[in-house]
Image (cartoon, grey):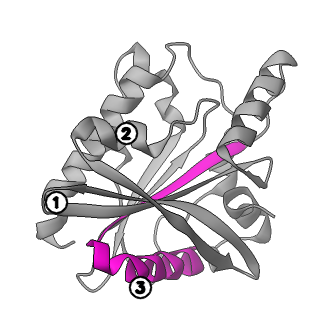
Amino acid sequence: MNPKYRPIITTLLLAVTIALAFGIPKTKYQGTDVLAAIDLPPATPGWNVEDVTDEIDQGGNNMNFLGHILVREYDKDQGPLLYLFLLDANNFHHPKACIGGAGFDSEDLKDIEFNVSGHSWKAKAIYFQKQDEGFLTVYWICINKEQVDWTGQKFLQLWDSLYSKKKPGVMVRIDITATKDQIDQAGQTIQRLLTDLAAQMTPEQQNYLFGK
């Protein structure tokens, strides 16, 4: 891992912790264990991989649901750092809620298209910047192996709560260090990571993560 990226990543993880601590109900979340179904490989050929889930403070009542989160750090050839967040919960939070509290300005970008195993989709994209630090965030939500937008997710969450139903849902978020003129290149790097991850996964696992 390139040491020069450490300060910004420390800030990101701290921001995630703060947002989750104040934005999530204290009730113990009982998930569908979708992360176990995805079973993300612990190693990916060609990438340096580190599980940094434990760097997010999971103590206290406000953090009850964090047993359903996975955070992996990826890099290759001393290139930019990528952080992959997988969140299994019925209360997804917007990335701006995490990062804005750390003093980063945000800019909504046009959606970025990805393709895995012949399945294409467009992920939401945001660029965050504070002084000389900047990174690209892309994210999408899959519920019951189907991609939904933010409004659709909230509707399904309300519907399921009324009828005491639970569908496996996951929010996928990827952060990558980049300057504003490196956004296209950053998107290509994310695509390479997704392609390499999918090569290790069954079609069923891919459906949970990327949608059908």
Task: Report, in whole angstroms, how far the alpha carbon at label 3 lies from the one at label 1.
Answer: 21 Å
* Residue 10 coordinates in the image, percent (x, y): 20, 49
Q: Which residue is mark 2?
A: 98
Neighbourhood count class around disc 2 (C-alpha, 10 Å): few under 14, some 14–19, many 20 upward: many
Q: Are marks 2 and 3 in contact (CB under 8 Å)?
A: no
Magenta part of the protein: which range? 169-197
Q: Which label is found at residue 6?
A: 1
Q: Is residue 185 magenta?
A: yes
* Residue 32 shows in the view: no
Q: Residue at x 22, y 41 (%)?
A: 103
Q: Tell us which disc is closer to us: 1 or 2.
A: 2
CA distance separating discs 1 and 2: 18 Å
Indicate the secondary structure of the residue bearing disc 1.
helix
Mark 2 belongs to which amino acid? Answer: Cys
Taking 198 as reference, is 50 left or right? left
Q: Secondary structure at mark 3?
A: loop
Identity of the residue drawn at 53% across and 67% down: 110
Q: Position of residue 81 (x, y in %)?
A: 30, 69
Q: The N terminus appears in which quarter of the rendering? A: bottom left
Neighbourhood count class around disc 1 (C-alpha, 10 Å): few under 14, some 14–19, many 20 upward: few
Q: Which residue is mark 3?
A: 46
